[in-house]
Image: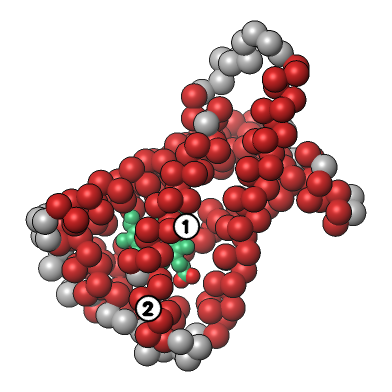
Amino acid sequence: MTWKQMFTSSVGKKLVMGFTGIFLILFLIVHVGLNACIWANDGGEMFNKAAHFMGSNLIPRILEIGLFVGFILHIVQGYMLTLQNNKARSVGYAVNYKDGSKWYSRSMALLGSIILIFLIIHLSHFWIPNRMQQGLTLGNEKDLYALMKETFSGNDSRTLITIVVYILGCAALGYHLAHGFQSAFKTLGIHNKKYFQMLAAIGFIFSIVVCLAFALMPLSFHFGWIN
Ligand code: HEM
């Protein structure tokens, strides 16, 4: 397959979705793992140490560029595939295409769009202020623990709306992953029934654990479960 076909044919587009999807899943594992340091309940010492490592090292900062490229490719190809499928469907089958599939596997573009809105809001809370302070330098990052505490702690309507947005974002992510995890491995060629069933089960548990862990973070600050 040529590079051009990779981005224009539907098989190529699906491959790009699969590869970038797995890359983004790896990012989520690192992100949820690093953020879980907040539950050390040590006033943010462990979390800020881990965040400092990520912010002061060249390799994570270079990987960050790859992460944004991965996000953009995943989003653009996702919308292109959806448009292509919708077009084919309006010609293809006039009646019912629901074939017993789950609602969330038929709503990947909608769930992805909710995650995209969440992501823009989320980056404006943490990543943008942090990078504005850092500029092109390494280190010199904000006290991200204090920033999270400030973002989620209050009882004013702005904070409460922020928390609802985070929980909706995490729920959309959970459903997106519940289909996306297994779908990515299928696209990359795992068709053996036994392995596929195992991956589907791992994907399902992964989606629930990751989305619950993320959703519990703003709640932990808000309800003062951590100091
Ligand atoms: C819900 C709980 C979450 C909390 C408390 C949280 C917290 C944070 C913090 C503090 C940063 C700043 C890191 C930095 O500037 O170095 C960050 C960055 C980021 N977060 Fe989250 N996050 C959450 C969920 C998510 C989810 C669900 C996603 C993806 C869908 C996500 C995607 C990102 C991305 C892409 C970055 C920028 C990463 C980088 O390049 O440094 N986050 N998050």
* Kind of residue indicated by mark 2: Asn
Residue 219 at least partly seen = no
Residue 145 at least partly seen = yes
Residue 65 locus on image (x, y percent): 59, 72
Instruction: Name the foreground residue: 18 vs 112.
Output: 112
Residue 162 image-quadrant placement: bottom left
Q: Residue at x 60, y 50 (%)?
A: 75
Q: Which residue is under mark 2?
A: 130
- Say whether residue 217 is left or right of residue 157: right
Residue 181 image-quadrant placement: top right
Of circles 1 and 2, which is in front?
2
Q: Residue at x 37, y 41 (%)?
A: 171
Mark 1: few/some/many CA within 10 Å (<14, 14-19, 20+) = some
Residue 10 locus on image (x, y percent): 78, 39
Instruction: Name the foreground residue: 158 vs 206.
Output: 158
Q: Which residue is under mark 1?
A: 28
Q: Secondary structure at mark 1?
A: helix
Instruction: Name the foreground residue: 54 vs 11.
Output: 11
- Mark 2, ligand 1, within 8 Å: the answer is yes
* Kind of residue indicated by mark 1: Leu
